[in-house]
Image: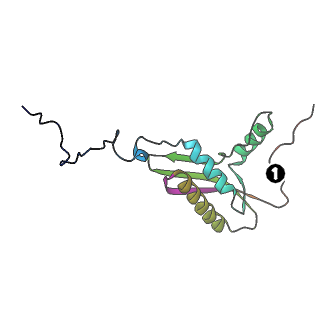
Amino acid sequence: MTDMTQSTEAEPQLRKTTRRGGGDPATRGRTTIADGVVEKIAGLAARDVLGVHAMGSGLSRTFGAVRDRVPGGSKSVTRGVKAEVGEVQTALDLEIVVDYGVSIADVAKAVRENVVAAVERMTGLEVVEVNIAVSDVKLPDEEDEEPEPRIQ
């Protein structure tokens, strides 16, 4: 009897290479991005626009200024930014204070463009909307609302 399982030199051996897990490694698994991550990116991008004096309402800026002065505290880059993040899209609400004399429409347009570009580039999420509320105008002779530190 002859063994039929042995291959002869005339028959090339074909090896099937199997890939474990199947598919491209980059597509295995899910990436989730927290709302706070998108808020930080958007906050920094909005602050980069000329004409944006501050972010947030007067009350949130006051509390933030007090918190910033506490030892170990850090500046909140998410102040004035709210994000709703889905699996592939995000929507943002920003509250800004503009400098007196600038065109609010131009500043809002520049903020939208900068925020959309930064968030989409860094996260891969599609930004479906950036709503901007202008809560105040910083006049040239106004002092910032940050309270002076108390010395005791």
Residue at the right extreme, as displayed: 152
Q: Is residue 18 visible?
A: yes
Q: How many numbered tags mark residues here?
A: 1
Is residue 52 covered in magenta?
no
Q: Which residues are magenta?
A: 124-135
**Image quadrant in which you'd find residue 53:** bottom right
Q: How is the image coloured?
A: rainbow
Residue neighbourhood size for the residue with mark 1, other residues' Cα within 10 Å, grouped as few (<14), some (14–19), many (≥20): few
Residue at (43% x, 47% y) in the render: 26
Horizontal placement of 17 versus 104: left or right? left
Residue at horizontal 75 percent and vertical 67 percent from the top: 101
Identify which residue, 44 or 81, lies in the foreground: 44
Measured as percent of width and height from the top left, residue 56 is found at 68, 49
Amino acid type at mark 1: Asp
Give the answer, above or below, for where 61 lies relative to 5.
Answer: below
Q: Is residue 129 magenta?
A: yes
Residue furthest left as drawn: 1
Report the residue at 87% width, 39% height from top: 149
Query: Viewed as shown, does residue 146 lie left or right of 51?
Result: right
Q: Is residue 135 visible?
A: no
Mark 1 element type: loop
The quarter in which the C terminus is drawn is top right
Give the labeled residue for mark 1: 144
Q: Quadrant of residue 130?
A: bottom right
Q: Looking at the magenta stretch, what is its main secondary structure?
A: strand
Q: Quadrant of the N terminus?
A: top left
Q: Position of residue 41 (x, y in %)?
A: 61, 50
Q: Position of residue 25 (x, y in %)?
A: 41, 45
Left/right placement of residue 7 relative to residue 137 reads left
Q: Position of residue 28 (x, y in %)?
A: 40, 42
